[in-house]
Image (cartoon, rainbow, N blue to C red):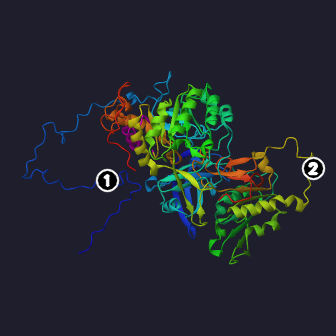
Amino acid sequence: MRLAGAELVESRLILPGQWLQTYAAPWLTAGGVRAGQFVHVRTPDYSGLVLRRPFSINTVDRAAGRMTIHFRITGKGTEWLARARPGEVIDMLGPLGRPFEVDPRTRHVLLVAGGLGMAGVRALADEALEAGRQVTLLFGARGAAEVYPSSLLPPEVEYVVSTDDGSLGHVGRVTDLLPGYEAWADQAFACGPWPMLSAAAGLATGRDARLGVARLGRRGGPRNAAARGTAAARRRAWLQVSLEQNMGCAVGACLGCVVFGVDGPQRVCREGPVFAADEIVWEGSPA
Amino acid sequence: MKPRRRVVPDRTRAAEPYPTPRRRAALGAGPRSRVQVTRPPDGSTNSTAPPRPPAVPADAVDLTIDLAPDRPGGLRLRNPILVASGTFGYGIEYGDVVDVQGLGAICCKGTTLKARVGNLPPRVTETPAGMLNSIGLQNPGVDAVIEKYAALWATWQVPVIVNVAGESIEDYVGVVRRLDGVPGVAGIELNISCPNVGKGGLQFAVDREAAGAVTAAVRRATDLPLMVKLSPNVADVRAIAQAIEAAGADAISAINTLSGMAIDRDRRRPLLGNTYGGLSGPAIKPVALRVVYEVAQVVRIPVVAIGGVAALEDVLDFLFAGASAVQVGTAIFADPGLPLRLVDELAAWCGAQGLASHREVIGAALPVGARKGARGQDRPSVKGVEYRP
């Protein structure tokens, strides 16, 4: 974790109200930044904004020392950020949070993104391809106008789109596509609104039974089973989710971004934002 | 006439993006003026301003402050900039980006007797010039806090003041008894803005008797320096401050958050999981100033100001209003380096003003006669500062 300035290199409106910004931040990319982590961006205090804004690290270009963030204008902070001009230096704290954990044996990676959830899983597409894995990306949006442009994705990614109104791709929820890929995928990684993640988690719990995956060995799991929440345990989970929550400090001090997990309150900024789906209590809505 | 072409400078790269515009010489200042302006021979323009003492080097300024002067050993801080409870965790979370040893003191997250899971999310939201939080005192319980952090705190030179919360006087006493004598615990800050279960959920902080009783009970339970945190959500904060002082507190910190709420317009219901939250940030600074100003006139123990400190100007305002030290809270989230910068800026300011210590200006804005002087002085008058709601 470091606190430094990142120079805005390019700012593009990629979808209505959605921006893709490229920052030169060699201090960030040189470190071990990984897919799933985020940066906490400072907003100008003269406008009465007192909190930083967390953004998933969207893509990382280590050679050029650049990274991108993808966001939608939802309030004053993002509005201000969208108006930033190339050359401006933005104060960032990062990289923060824990990354997606991909099992070394995983060949087929399934990414599930709902709307702006693309920002959460986008970096993992690059990382998985780099590691020689096959990537399928299921993307859900309300309508064709909000579908993430395929030109911004690596060509090796199989990109499957669903829209709520059927204006592009499959009709319905992105989670409706999930059962078709559950046998193919060795691991799945999802980011999006809570109901979508909750539905995905529901599907993931029944997967082993449906596919007839045998549980071998000791009853109650192996003796050296990794404790829930550790990187090793997450690596074994079929579904990992990247959660979103209002955030204060983003370093674990204020306990403002907590969601409730099976083992009690979990800080999205510190234990997350990536969790194994079985770590989270999905009943009820956090928001 | 052809309009003159406007040259727009590239302000993002210029060394001086907004240079002072050239102005014509003011009337009466130029050599051609007929009006003779008389100036004092020493060149000063305002003869009523006191002569400024010579500047003091910033590193020679004495920023130390004792928050428990009556207590044997006291609670001596290297500087008057503390970090407020709940915004700095247990002092380790910001370790990568902040050198915590340079702080005056750390007030750790509120600690209760038993572990608490806290309120339902969402727990924080931004509001104009502030934020609302309803964490719900999530913490692992006093025993776990001591086990996990006290040994580390004991190696630090920065004092750690443990913030204590409870639902009954027995709770508070239980926590404080466990903290008493633990190496690494430099003092206690009592969060009395908690519902008193024994009194039908009424907050300790809103009731003079309850505030005094809990302070007195804790005072009997420990010899650690004891600071009590006032709530602004009361009718007359001075009576409560006096009760707390009479019950034996070494210092008073003010203020806790203001009660507030936010609405989620999309869902048409309260935004916070707990409905109500505490408002903090620059939005509450005027309220905090008023409370500090009032309390500083009726108590002789040090007052530690909290509420919207985001710049040196805020620190100075609180010092002038009678605070001996300030706690930085919400501003840390945006700018983790702020508290340490404030220490340097305060030293530089004192130096430039020719002050040997910031203590010389504590209470400078208080009415004459209400300023805290040497100990043993008569009780300060409260005449003329009656509370007008």
Identify the residue shown where x is 32% and y is 42%: B384
Callout 1 environment at 10 Å: few (<14), some (14 to 19), or many (20+)?
Answer: few
Q: Position of residue B73 (x, y in %)?
A: 50, 22
- Residue in the foreground of this view, choosing between A200 and B328: B328
Q: Could you say whether the residue bearing mark 2 is in a helix, strand or loop?
A: loop
Identify the residue shown where x is 52% and y is 38%: B209
Answer yes or no: do the residues labelled 1 and 2 have beta carbons within 8 Å?
Answer: no
What type is the residue that disc 1 sits on? Pro
Q: Chain of mark 2?
A: A
Give the labeled residue for mark 1: B19
What type is the residue that disc 2 sits on? Leu
Callout 2 environment at 10 Å: few (<14), some (14 to 19), or many (20+)?
Answer: few
Q: Is B302 positioned to the left or the right of B112 in the image?
A: left
Q: Position of residue B260 (x, y in %)?
A: 52, 54
Task: Give the distance between the C-alpha atoms of the residues marked 1 and 2, in whole angstroms.
Answer: 75 Å
State whether residue B134 is above or below residue A154. Answer: above
Q: Is residue B325 magenta?
A: yes
State whether residue B13 is above or below residue B49. Answer: below
- Residue in the foreground of this view, choosing between B326 and B243: B243
Identify the residue shown where x is 64% and y is 36%: B171
State whether residue B178 is above or below residue A4. Answer: above
Q: Is B244 positioned to the left or the right of A98 in the image?
A: left
Identify the residue shown where x is 64% and y is 44%: B138
Q: Could you say whether the residue bearing mark 1 is in a helix, strand or loop?
A: loop
Residue A216: mark: 2
Q: Which residues are magenta?
A: B309-326
